[in-house]
Amino acid sequence: MFSAGDLLAWSEQYYWPFLRISALFLASPIFGASSFPVRARVLLAVMITALVVPSLPMLPKIDLLGAAGLLVAGQQVIIGLAMGFIVQMVFAAVVVAGQSLAMAMGLGFAMSVDPQNGVQVPVLSQLYMILATLLFLGVNGHLLLIQFLVNSFTLLPVGLSGLRHDFGLDVVLWASQMFLGALVLALPALTALLLINIAFGVVTRAAPQLNIFAVGFPVTILAGFVFIFLTMPSVLSQLMYLFDTGLSQALLLIR
């Protein structure tokens, strides 16, 4: 028979890692999507915790119901959420890039539900999101994220040592990369559409009787898709760079 102390010590070994792992799955892309079943997410967190705990360093003895236990539990949740949020910002940059292109092409009215976030986004954002998700899975980004999460228990062990004083600042500064990444993804096609709109402005001044709305919208939509197709190789390479940078930042966050 197991005593109450034995059961409490056994649960402590799995409690702290489970908090960090489940928090990452809550905020990370793909695992944290609204279309991902909650039961499957919890079951996956339990399975990974059971596999990871035997290889982790010895966890300190902390009272689960005491003030120290609440402090450590909050730290584990913050670490997991921050690591997932870092990678989630890469997918947010993809959505912003699609929205910028949709507005420039005149497709801002064409909206659809994003299964990743459960909100209305333009169809171009949905296209870029699907490409980013397939690319992320194709390069095993989800497995690398789980590997970095497991390594975080060695780099930042469970305990009362606390987080770095600039931990939150690093997360906030990385969020600014969302707008930079979105600009780099959409800049080639946006530049071409800007030149087309300038050309239509010159044509309108030269021939005021021309109905610019009847001619301009079909041309900008067609030209937008053409330039999206032409710039797709650079978009994919930039997505690879953003994924690599995001995963590296998630690991550096708990250095």
Image (tube, rainbow, N blue to C red):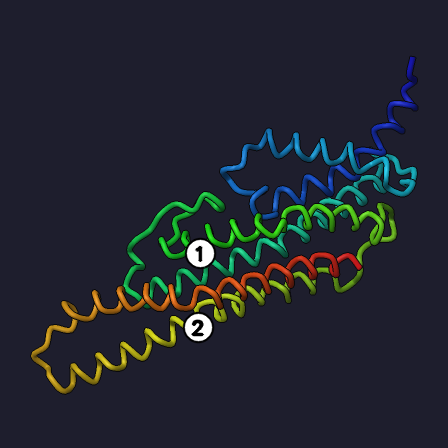
- The quarter of the picture where residue 252 lies is bottom right
Left or right: where 163 falls relative to 25? right
Task: Please name the residue shown 11% across and 73% down the image.
Answer: 211
Residue designated by label 2: 187
Which element type, helix, strand or loop, lies under badge 1?
A: helix
Left or right: where 3 falls relative to 51? right
Outermost residue toward the left? 209
- The quarter of the picture where residue 23 lies is top right
The kind of residue tagged 1 is Tyr
The kind of residue tagged 2 is Leu
Task: Please name the residue shown 33% across and 64% down the image.
Answer: 103
Question: Where in the figure is residue 90, as x and y percent of width and height?
Answer: 56, 58
The answer to whether residue 30 is above or below residue 209 is: above
Q: Residue 116 versus residue 3: which sits nearer the camera? A: 116
The answer to whether residue 247 is above or below residue 64 is: below
- The quarter of the picture where residue 228 lies is bottom left
Q: Residue 173 versus residue 105: which sits nearer the camera? A: 105
Task: Please name the residue shown 33% across and 51% down the image.
Answer: 111
Instruction: Characterize the local packing of mark 2: few (<14), some (14-19) or many (20 or more) Cα atoms within 10 angstroms.
Output: some
Question: Where in the figure is residue 20, as x and y percent of width and height?
Answer: 73, 43
Which element type, helix, strand or loop, lies under badge 2?
A: helix
Q: Tell me how far mark 2 sits from mark 1, CA to CA.
A: 14 Å
The numbered dot on residue 128 is 1
What number of labels is visible? 2
Task: Please name the residue shown 64% across and 42% down the image.
Answer: 25
